[in-house]
Image (cartoon, grey):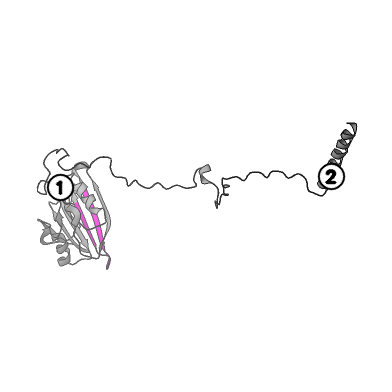
């Protein structure tokens, strides 16, 4: 019984030594490999830039909505009528500015219209041929109103002046001195024509309030009376 036990111990020692030798040669007890995962691994992101969902966009364009209306558009029968639709014959026609034909600067028609609408006597404006330009124009509404406007012809510096209303307090009517040479037209009025040292003058209602005076320098009689005859009445 003692021999069998000793033999068993010796055999156990021999097996243990054999295991050590085999382990030193790299032939250890095989281990179980880890189980392979059946789920595919997640591929890395291929984004070329930063994730723009992490912050506000650098620019934004809001386009108008093209979505259809949530309800039907009203038809003509759905819109309550506020009255009869005016036709062309019921619309008031705009009144043209009577001074639109007056010679001068861009605002000359308004200048004349403002004065003519503020006084009770007839007001006339010059309608001049090409070559004339406005020099100055003034008016006042005090004491019945008066207006003065001057023009010059570029080619020879001839001048043409109009004075209307209560512009003169002199008994002479502020008419340049000269020789009476008959009558002449002042628009649709008729005045006394005077030949002066440098041209002609034409006065209507001399010395009265109102009165009308045209003075031309450097003009012959035919040219001067053509200008006074083409004066345009504004009121």
Residue 210 got which mark? 1
Q: Which stretch did the figure color magenta? A: 146-163
Residue 39 on the magenta span: no
Predominant SS of the magenta segment? strand
- The answer to whether residue 174 is seen in the rendering is no
| For residue 122, side relative to residue 14 (left or right) | left
Displayed quadrant of residue 80: top left
Between residue 206 and residue 172, name the one nearer to us.
206
Q: Is mark 1 on a helix, strand or loop?
A: loop
| Mark closer to the chain start, 1 or 2 | 2
In this view, the residue farthest toward the front is 1
Q: Residue placed at 21% from the left, 47% from the top? A: 114
- The residue singled out by tag 2 in the image is 18
| For residue 90, side relative to residue 139 (left or right) | left
Residue 37 vs 175, above or below: the answer is: above
Q: Residue placed at 14% from the left, 60% from the top? A: 230
In this view, the residue farthest toward the top is 1
- The residue carrying pointer 1 sits among few (fewer than 14), some (14 to 19) or many (20 or more) residues within 10 Å by Cα, namely some
């Amino acid at each position: 019984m003692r021999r069998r036990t000793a033999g068993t111990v010796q055999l156990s020692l021999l097996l243990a030594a054999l295991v050590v030798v085999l382990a030193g040669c790299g032939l250890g007890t095989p281990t179980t490999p880890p189980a392979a995962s059946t789920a595919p691994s997640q591929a890395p992101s291929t984004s070329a830039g930063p994730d723009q969902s992490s912050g506000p966009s650098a620019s934004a364009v809001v386009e108008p909505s093209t979505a259809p209306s949530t309800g039907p558009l009203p038809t003509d029968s759905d819109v309550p009528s506020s009255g009869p639709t005016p036709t062309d014959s019921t619309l008031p026609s705009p009144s043209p500015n009577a001074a639109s034909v007056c010679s001068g600067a861009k605002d000359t028609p308004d200048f004349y219209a403002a004065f003519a609408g503020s006084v009770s006597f007839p007001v006339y404006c010059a309608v001049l041929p090409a070559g004339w330009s406005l020099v100055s124009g003034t008016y006042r509404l005090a004491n019945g109103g008066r207006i003065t406007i001057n023009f010059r012809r570029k080619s020879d510096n001839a001048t043409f002046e109009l004075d209307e209303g209560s512009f003169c307090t002199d008994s002479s009517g502020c008419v340049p001195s000269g020789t009476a040479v008959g009558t002449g037209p002042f628009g649709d009025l008729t005045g006394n024509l005077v030949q002066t040292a440098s041209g002609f003058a034409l006065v209507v209602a001399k010395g009265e309030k109102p009165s009308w005076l045209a003075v031309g320098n450097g003009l012959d009689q035919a040219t001067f009376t053509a200008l006074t005859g083409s004066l345009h009445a504004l009121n």
